[in-house]
Image (spheres, helix red, strand yellow):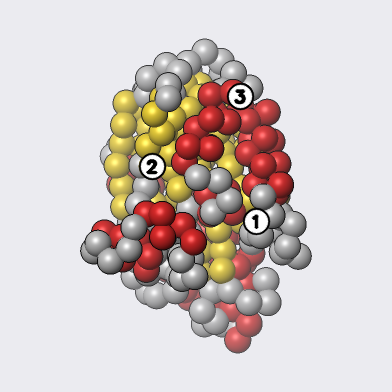
Amino acid sequence: MKYRFAAETDVGRVRRNNEDSLIADPDRGLFVVADGMGGHAAGEVASGMAVGQVAGYVERYADIQSDRAKLLAQAIKKANEAIYRNSLTEERLLGMGTTVTAVMIENGRLYWAHVGDSRLYCVDGREIRQISADHTLVAQMVADGRISLEDARVHHRRNVLVNAVGVDNVVEVDTGSEQLAAGQCWLICSDGLSDMLDDREIADLVRQWQNDPAGLCRQLVSEANRRGGVDNITVVAIVAGDGVGQ
């Protein structure tokens, strides 16, 4: 299955630094988005370490570990160890952490691994599905029936993570895989996008710009900024079908 892709990251309208990081490596079919957290630019350190560690681990062990979802999970766990150790070396880095959502495409299948509240979406026709689960306090409250999805979008604690990479010496990683189908658009994004646009609005822009992944990324970032751009915004768009890819 061939695919086309594009990626874009933007500091937004409020933040001074971009604490998001991404890697888009079509040679390995590897795409990773990380959204860092921590004061004094520690978030930048955490997210940069995460994407670098994941890419390095995949490069070293791709020929050994054939289970691609497990490979990505192992890569994230190694990144967690490295970030946690590094956070103990300097006071300014103490408590730093990051989300990580990683995708690997191989032989017409998409494998994913995820920690945090960055998101993986699949848009197929008029349907949009959030593939990843948000590891947040508010998502737990929705699952428990304490608040509605509508309330969750505006809840004052919606960005409180209950699972992140680098904040502890162990981390739980969600994984999965799906068969690619022509016409699908897969999006990896930081919450700087999903906090500004709801799922329907994201799907509408995908339908308008799906034939132009680079234009789609620009439009998503532009619209998030138009709504206020209160956080860094990062998006990777992968369109299954014709074009370059594996």
For disc 2, the marked residue is 130
Observer-nearest of 159 and 76: 159
Viewer-nearest of discs 3 and 1: 3
State yes or no: discs 3 and 1 in contact (Cβ < 8 Å): no
Instruction: Check the image and report above or below for 22 versus 88.
Output: above
Residue 32 drawn at (x, y percent): 51, 46
The answer for how far apart the CA atoms under marks 3 and 2 are is 19 Å
Instruction: Using residue 64 as the reference point, say whether residue 211 is left or right of it.
Output: right
- Callout 3 crowding tier (Cα within 10 Å): few <14, some 14–19, many ≥20: some
The part of the image, by quadrant, that contains residue 18 is bottom right
| Image height of 107 relative to 229, above or below | above
Residue 17 in view (yes/no) = no
- Distance between the Cα atoms at labels 3 and 1? 22 Å
- Three-letter residue code for mark 3: Trp
Quarter of the image with the N terminus in it: top left
Residue 209: give its label: 3
User: Which residue is depicted at the point 42% across and 21% down?
Assistant: 125
Label 1, on which residue? 232
Q: Which residue is at the far top?
A: 242
